[in-house]
Amino acid sequence: MREFDRREALLAAVGVFWRHGYAKASIHELTGAMGLHRAQIYQAFGSKEELFAEVVRTYSNLAFETVFAPLEDRRVTSDGASALAAIEECLERLAQSVEDPERPGCLVESSLLTPANELGVAHRACLEHLARMEAGLRRVLETGRERGEISSEPSLDEQVAVVRGAMMGMACVQLVDRRTGGPRAVRRALLNFLRSQPERQPEESSTSNQGS
């Protein structure tokens, strides 16, 4: 078998699975995108299921190099960098990502709609991605709570659950609320939810509604 760049092949496969999903991504499309023959794919990766597991891990690593990088910034836990600012930056990057028309949602979230018995080892790779995101959130939120940057209420577990769920839902919000900047509204609400002293929104003057 001729040598090939495994990372480049996996990045090409990410695009195919991202556009079509696990079930609808055909070997024909994968061979064309990856520049490999069918036999080469099976010899190198074992099966479509095992290939997809590697694709999910590649996608996850890319996500943590870009969108979720602030959650693993050691300066937050070691050097006193702002925990709230790290969350804010992560949410900003996520909002930009879901607003990008070239990005068809989250590969991991869409893949989890496929029954676990069909995904096999790839299902475990999806759960590993979510666990990594939760661990990063927990570290940053806990640090912020200890410093008084982030509210001590509700509990840390509840804060992690709320932020994680909202982050996972931002792509759906974008699909149904494109005109009003839905992801940005989610971002603002989350930050206000986390702040130890929430920002007050300016109230509209009621004088316009009163008679002269």
Image: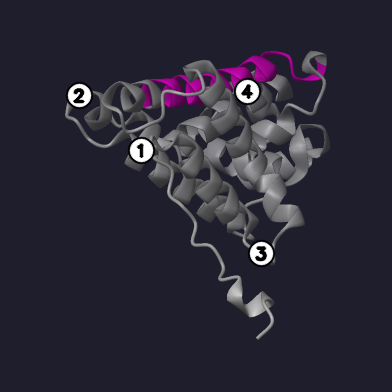
Q: Is residue 151 visible?
A: yes
Specify whether 55 is left or right of 90.
Answer: right
**Region rendered in magenta:** 118-140
> Residue 36, how many percent across, how many down?
62, 38
> Residue 42, how many percent across, how many down?
68, 23
Q: Quick one: label 3 or label 4, which is nearer the N terminus?
A: 4
Q: Secondary structure at mark 4?
A: helix
Where is 211 relative to 159, above or below?
A: below
Spatial separation of the CA atoms under disc 2 and disc 3: 38 Å
User: The disc labelled 1 sits on which kind of residue?
Assistant: Leu
Q: Neighbour class for label 4 at 10 Å: few (<14), some, many (≥20)?
A: many
The residue labelled by disc 3 is: 180
Q: Is residue 120 magenta?
A: yes
Nearer to us of marks 1 and 2 is 1
User: The disc labelled 2 sits on which kind of residue?
Assistant: Ser
In the rendered image, the residue lying farthest to the front is 212
The residue labelled by disc 4 is: 126
Specify whether 20 is left or right of 84.
Answer: right
User: The disc labelled 3 sits on which kind of residue?
Assistant: Thr
Q: Which mark is residue 84?
A: 1
Spatial separation of the CA atoms under disc 4 and disc 2: 29 Å
Residue beneath the point at 48% across and 43% down: 192
Q: Secondary structure at mark 2?
A: helix
Q: Label 4 near label 3: C-beta < 8 Å?
A: no
Q: Quick one: label 3 or label 1, which is nearer the N terminus?
A: 1
Residue beneath the point at 35% across and 29% down: 72
Q: Which mark is residue 185?
A: none
Q: Secondary structure at mark 1?
A: helix
User: The disc labelled 4 sits on which kind of residue?
Assistant: Cys
Spatial separation of the CA atoms under disc 3 and disc 1: 25 Å
> Residue 96, how many percent across, how many down?
52, 55
The residue labelled by disc 2 is: 78
